[in-house]
Amino acid sequence: MSAVSAPAPRTVLLTGAAGGVGTLMRELLPSFGYRLRLLDARPIQDGPGAGTAITADLADRDALRAAVRGVDAILHLAGISKESDFDRILRANIEGTYNLYEAAREEGVRRIVFASSNHAVGFTPRPRGGDPLIPVDTPRRPDTYYGLSKCFGEDLAQLYADRHGIDTVSIRIGSCFPAPSTVRMLSVWMSPADGARLFHAALTADVTGHTVVYGSSANTRLWWDLGPARALGYEPQDDSEPFAAALIAEQGELDPADPAQANLGGAFCTDAPRWEH
């Protein structure tokens, strides 16, 4: 059964507002009626909302609590978005997310949308030829310390829902870019416009507790089940297929024998020095 949308929150704290997805959402979410409060460890010097942006690290609990104060909801995109050494992931993604939830608890914020990742289940084999789509309740198989931090974030969201009544929608985002750049991305791509639609649905859906959904467009080559996201009221409008012919001509079809192409997490499942969503 589809969730019934609640009135849109008036003010939303957007963490990670200087990042790739955050920059896209700064431009797109105000059209849904939101007033954004921006937070990032890096100064935001241009673009929408730059004049009122807060420069603070997630480790600064006082600044974080002040940033959270008075908002109706939080869209948490901040943190390291690629693999790194464990100490950096611990500080930014694990301790930083804990600090955010504590600030939300202390200030009475009751809705968080958490940017999880497909890398929380990265070692899950991708579907092939007629296999069913991957459900959200597939066992978690993180492919990196980064993926592990997203598993932590999902568990933290569950704890704060059960113990403190903070409702969270965790979105396992695929690749949110203006266009897919690899053949693998044809299956996990989420257009920025669909990203804004999904974040809006997650911010407004009449759901309680902790909800996990996958985040992508309605791609012809989709690997995972978008049913739970649609149940929030998400109606994806885009498909990566118009990009397929050119990418396949350049890169070839995916090779199931290649570890970087056999699993949901792609290159995150290898020891490659560079990482790709």
Image (spheres, helix red, strand yellow):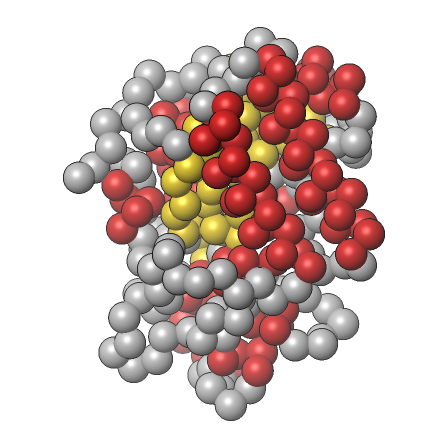
Quarter holding the C terminus is bottom right
Answer left or right for 39 relative to 189. right
Which quadrant would residue 223 be assigned to in this image? bottom left
Residue occupying the far left of the picture: 1
Residue shown at the point (20%, 37%) measured from the top left: 2
- Residue 256: tell me if it is visible: yes
Quarter holding the N terminus is top left
- Residue 178: tell me if it is visible: no
Question: Which residue is more in the foreground, 154 or 269?
Answer: 154
Residue 162 image position (x, y, % from top left): 45, 31
On screen, residue 126 above or below 160: below
Residue 155 image position (x, y, % from top left): 53, 44
On screen, residue 263 above or below 71: below
On screen, residue 268 above or below 109: below
On screen, residue 118 above or below 109: below
Question: Which residue is more in the foreground, 15 or 123?
Answer: 123
